[in-house]
Each structure stands twice: as structure tokens, then as C-alpha cells.
Amino acid sequence: MEYDPTLPWYRRLHWQVLSAMILGLGVGWAFGAPAANAIGWIGELFMKLLRMIIVPLVLTSIVSGVASVGGGRAIGRLFGKTMGYYVLSSMLAALTGLLMVNLIRPGQNADMGAAAQQEVPELSTPDSPVELILDIVPSNFFAAASAGDMLAIIFFCIVFGAAITGLPEKPRVVVTDIFDAFFKAMMALTSGIIKFLPIGVFALITRMVGETGFDRFAALAKYFATIGSGLTIHLFITMPLLLILLGRIKPLVHFANLREPLLTAFSTSSSGATLPVTIKTLREKVGVSNKVSSFVLPMGATVNMDGTAIFECAGALFIAQVLGVDLTIGQQAIVVLTALLASIGAAAVPSAGVVVIFIVLNAIGLGDNPEAITIVGAMLAIDRPLDMYRTAVNVFSDSCGAAIIARSEGEEGVDTEVRH
């Protein structure tokens, strides 16, 4: 659901989700198991809808985003710098999520009802980096899509989108327009499903409380603190360091110039809805040229999701810890790599990160586990404030990338002063 400031407060998605959570808590506590049995199927249906759109959403998002870049040497140089920065920042974000979830271990000995006692099948791990690379490259894309092999799907989409940019102009425009139309259709479908988020949250919370009481929320509070601390570290430590080291930019100046986009991102939970504000601010206050801002920022709103990378990495490891699965270093490396690539495919709409967390779970063999799906449903209950925070992190990372790339292109007036 796109943000509309003209809507009354009670029709905005974040208030609807909060109201649904409170109502679900009350119904689950008052009526217990009967309410859980009567309403629980609605939450399960909502989760199936989210999982249904994963493959087509990732396919169209990545191909459309990469293919829309176009050709030319200057564009190629700008594209290389932009993708290099986005990969670096997203990788640092995923590693931050990995670090925090291993330090805090929010899912260890967590009381999440039957989930903690569920027997989980043994997970497979590539024996070497070479085997991991071979697993990423699909021998049959359609078989990979059918099997839900998301690493292979994402790899194919990236190289296919890059190949489209090398076509002559006429066929490139035709193919790009087709994928862009499909992407807009998937965005419309995703936004339509997200509109039912309050109903899904109500049903999932009612079932959870009706079956297990309020015990699960203690573990969720620790999980909330883990994600929040990871986002804070990335926003106030990692990104300022990148500004200083890569762009020779004063972080305090950049923060001050980005006040309006950060507040908009936090209130809307949508990088896409914040994009016009971000572009305007980067041009008028940060001092980034139209050439750089019009290229880097729209691309960033599609493929650069640092906050989502933290959420996906830490969220998947939290679920594994709750289920009693001790992931090896190799499996955690797969989680980081998958979170990095999956964040590229996250749509710039509210709560889209919840959709693509299944990509990471599939990579470690937990995507079809019923208790893992139940835990994801419980995580939805407290996801709204986290979604607001990670959207602000996403937007700030996009702005840092634009400022750093503008400096690398020789633009001298970037963040020289705080502009009001």
C-alpha cells in the first residue's frame, strides 16, 4: 500500500496493523484455542499469498532494475560504481545482522510453543566455495524456479538483466518495457496483498495467543532488540564510515541535510513513496547533480535494501535458533550471501521484507517447515516499527551512495554545508 498523506490516520497501514495486533491479542486471550482454530486458517492463507509472489516478484524486480540502466560507456561506469557501492553496503549490513544475532542469540532457549520441540531435518552445506558457486549457477532456470532455488534464480536474473543492457537500442527498449510492465504488475499485486496485512496479523496473533498465551512475546522482544541494534549500528557507525572513507563527506552534515527524507521514510515504510522527496533533497540540499541522482536513487530504491538485508539475515538465524538448528559457518555464509542477493529483489513497498525472508529460509532448508512459517507469522506482530526503521536505513544508504558517487564523478559541492 503506497503512502497517502491525505488519508485519515485510521486508514493508514501502520495504524491498521497496530490495531489488528491489539485486537488479536485480546481475542486470543479471551477465547483461547477455539478462536485460534476458527481464525488461524486466515493467517495461513495470508502467508501462502506472500510466498506465492516471491519468484515472480524477484524475477521482474531484478531484471527490470538492471535492464533499465541502458548502454554507453558513461552509463556503464556509473552503473559499475553504483552496483559496487550497493553490494558493499548490503554485504556490510548482512554481516552486521549476522554479528548481532550471534552475539545476542535471541532465539536460543526461546519459548515459542511447539516450535522449540519440532524436529528439523538435517540441512545441507556445500563442501567448498567452488561447490557453492556451482550451486548458484543453474543448469536449468525453469527447474530452479520450480524448486524455489532462489540463489540460482537471483543469479540468472542479474546476468540476464545485464545481458539486456548490451542489446541494440530497439530490442533493448522492447525487452526492458516488457519486464518493466511485468514489474509494475507485480508491484500492484504485492501492494494488493499487503493491504490484507492487518487481517493476516490479526489472524496470526489470535492463533498464537490462543494456542500458547503470551509466552512467545518474551522471545520476540529479544529479537526486536537484535534487529534494532543491528540497524542502529549500520545507520550510525557503518554508513558514516563509508561517507568519510569513500566520499570524504562529513556524516553530521549529511544527516542534517537528509532530515526530511528520513522522516518521510520512517513514517511511510516505503522507499518508493519516499523517492521523490529523496531526489529533491539530494539535488537541492546535498548538492548532487541530476545526472547522478536520477540514476543512482531510483536504482537504489529497487536494489539497495541494507535494512532489509539485516532483517533477513538476523530473522532467518533467529528462526533457526528457535528451532534448535545449529548452523555451521558455511550455512551462515549462505545466509549472508542469500540475504545480500534477496535484498536486491525486495520491492520498495511496506513490509516487503517479510515476503523475501522466505528466500533466505529456502536457502537453508527451512522454507517449507511449518513451525518456521508459524514463527514468521509471530514476527509479523512486531514488524511494523522495525519496518519503519529499516526503511529509513534503506533511504539513508541510497543517499550516501549518491553523495559518494557524485564526489567520485568530480562534483565538488556535495554536502559542503547544512542547507535549509
Image (cartoon, rainbow, N blue to C red):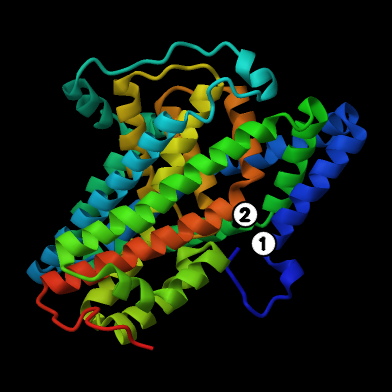
Q: Is residue 148 visible?
A: no
Q: Secondary structure at mark 1?
A: helix
Q: Which amino acid lies under the numbered mark 1 shown in the image of this protein?
A: Leu
Q: Which amino acid lies under the numbered mark 2 shown in the image of this protein?
A: Ile
x 9%, y 77%: residue = 410
Q: Crowdedness of circle 1 by 10 Å Cα count: few (<14), some, many (20+)?
A: many
Q: Secondary structure at mark 2?
A: helix
Question: In the figure, 377 relative to 59: above or below?
Answer: above
Judging by the rendered image, the residue that carries numbered circle 1 is 13
Q: Quadrant of the N terminus?
A: bottom right
Q: Is residue 123 visible?
A: yes
x 47%, y 59%: residue = 391
Question: In the figure, 113 relative to 348: above or below?
Answer: above
Does label 2 or label 1 sit earlier along the sequence? 1
Residue 273 vs residue 168: left or right?
right
Question: In the figure, 375 relative to 190: above or below?
Answer: above
x 92%, y 34%: residue = 31
Residue 406 or residue 348, whichever sits in front: 406
Percent across and percent down for residue 209 are 78, 33
Which quadrant holds residue 412? bottom left
Marks 2 and 1, how far apart at CA: 9 Å
Pointers 2 and 1 in contact (C-beta within 8 Å) = yes
Residue 366 vs residue 395: left or right?
right
Percent across and percent down for residue 116 are 61, 18
Circle nearer the viewer, 2 or 1? 1
Judging by the rendered image, the residue that carries numbered circle 2 is 194
Which quadrant holds residue 287? bottom left
